[in-house]
Amino acid sequence: MKPMQKGCYAVIFSNQLREQGDAFYTQLSTNLRELAKKQDGYIGLESYRNSDGSGVTISYWKTQEDVLNWKKNSEHLVAQHYGREKAYEHYRVQVCEVLRSYGYDSDF
Amino acid sequence: MKPMQKGCYAVIFSNQLREQGDAFYTQLSTNLRELAKKQDGYIGLESYRNSDGSGVTISYWKTQEDVLNWKKNSEHLVAQHYGREKAYEHYRVQVCEVLRSYGYDSDF
């Protein structure tokens, strides 16, 4: 895993799905990922989910403007599907600035 | 999920475990969580893992000094167990400042 560049922005989207293994949601996730990749300022995205349905997606962006565009575009896509309130028991979004980053890779 | 206060710090620790369901690692995770809770400036911690062994732990702290103490203390505890290089195929740490936060809860 390469360290992220200092000064980029991370959007931490923590959530609890209402329903596990929801095929509709799986499709939505795929579509959101594709949408993110196409957007200006996209750096990367990582996604994790526990077996109890709690999970997080962290996306990385070059500027705060990119973050705002991502908010607008992703909310629009979710609304087209069914609305966040129907998919999630609860969620929290945190917009962060990356101050520093370091890592380790066994292949280095 | 309550929104985090603006101006706190998030440490995003993304990693890939070498071995799935490692009992030693499960114990280490529990110990790290206990250690975090006892430390000054601790706000909260969330942890997620995919079935392929990739995962993330995000911890939240009041000040950058708290973040540095957490780095020192957690690395010390991990080293006492076996060293990060033995547990992880790769990992990445990102220290971030939380700029804004919002959320939704079906219980609200």
Image: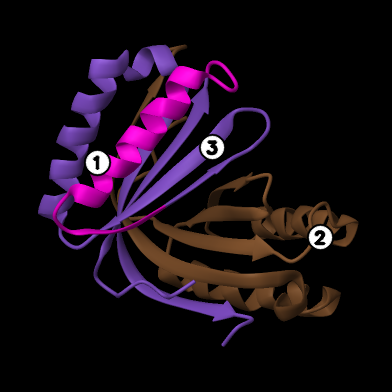
Chain colours: A purple, B brown
Which chain hosts label 1?
A
The count of marks equals: 3
A105 or B11: nearer the eye? A105
The answer to whether dots 1 and 2 both sit on one chain is no
Mark yes or no: residue B48 visible.
Answer: yes
| C-alpha separation, residue under disc 2 versus residue under disc 3 | 20 Å
Look at label 1 and name its amino acid. Leu
The kind of secondary structure element at disc 3 is strand
The kind of secondary structure element at disc 2 is helix
Q: Which residue is mark 2?
A: B25
| C-alpha separation, residue under disc 1 versus residue under disc 2 | 36 Å
Image coordinates of residue B73 in percent, x first then y, are: 67, 74
Residue A44 is covered by the magenta coloring: yes
Q: Is residue A70 above or below residue A104?
A: above
Query: Neighbour class for label 1 at 10 Å: few (<14), some, many (≥20)?
Result: some
The kind of secondary structure element at disc 1 is helix
Which chain hosts label 3?
A
Name the residue at 31% across, 36% down: A32
B104 or A19: nearer the eye? A19
Q: Which mark is residue A6?
A: none
Is the C terminus of chain B in the top left, top right, bottom left or bottom right quadrant? Answer: top left
- Residue found at the very far bottom of the displayed protein: A108
Look at label 2 and name its amino acid. Tyr
The magenta stretch is A18-45
Residue B31 is covered by the magenta coloring: no
N-terminal-most mark, 3 or 1: 1
Q: Which residue is mark 1?
A: A35
Name the residue at 52% across, 58% down: B41
Name the residue at 60% across, 21% down: A20
Q: Is residue A100 left or right of residue A50?
A: left
